[in-house]
Amino acid sequence: MHSINHFLSSRITEKKQLLEKLNQTILPLLPESCHSHITTSNYNNQVLTLIVDSPVWAARLRTQYKTIATTLMNQLNLEVKSVKIKFQQPVKIKPKPSKHIPTMSCKSAKLIRQTANNIDDEELKTTLLSLSNKADQ
C-alpha cells in the first residue's frame, strides 16, 4: 500500500510537469519580450490561470486568449474554456545590508585623547585612551 506522502508527491510532480509543459507551449506563442513576465500558475477544470508581473502584460495576454486555447487543444489535447490572468508583483528580495563598521577620524581620536588626559578617573581615562587608539590611520 502506498503512503499518502507518496501519493501527494506523485500528484505534485504531475502538476509541476503539466505546468512546465503548459509554459513551454504558451511562451513561444508570445513575443519574447514578455517571456520573463508571464508564468503558468494553474490548469484546473478547463480554466488556465496565468500570472503576470504587470497590468500591461495582462492586457497584452488577454488579446492572445484564442490562440493560447487553440494551441493547447491542438498540441496537448487540453480544452481551455477560460483564462484567468492574475497580476502579482514580483517578490523583491532585499539584499542584506552590509554591516556598517563605524570608523573614527584622526581628529576625533585626538579630541578623545585630550579629554582622557584631563580626567582624574583612571578607569575612564584608560578606556578613552584605548578608544582613541582605534582611529583610522
Image: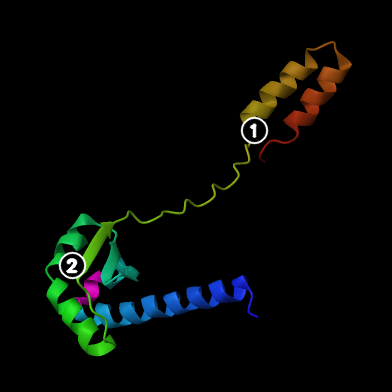
Q: Is residue 85 left or right of residue 60?
A: right
Q: Which residue is mark 2?
A: 61
Frontmost residue, 123 versus 117: 123
Residue 51, quarter of the rendered image: bottom left
Q: Position of residue 129 (x, y in %)?
A: 79, 26
Badge 2 amino acid: Leu
What's the residue at 42%, 80% (across, down)? 17
Tell whether label 2 touches label 1 (CB within 8 Å).
no
Frontmost residue, 129 versus 49: 49
Q: Which residue is mark 1?
A: 106
User: What is the tally of numbered marks visible in this picture?
Assistant: 2
The span from disc 1 to disc 2 (Cα, nearest Å) is 61 Å
- Range of residues picked out in magenta: 30-34
Which image quarter is the N terminus in? bottom right
Q: Is residue 33 magenta?
A: yes
Q: Position of residue 7 (x, y in %)?
A: 56, 75
Q: Is residue 41 left or right of residue 129?
A: left
N-terminal label among 1 and 2: 2
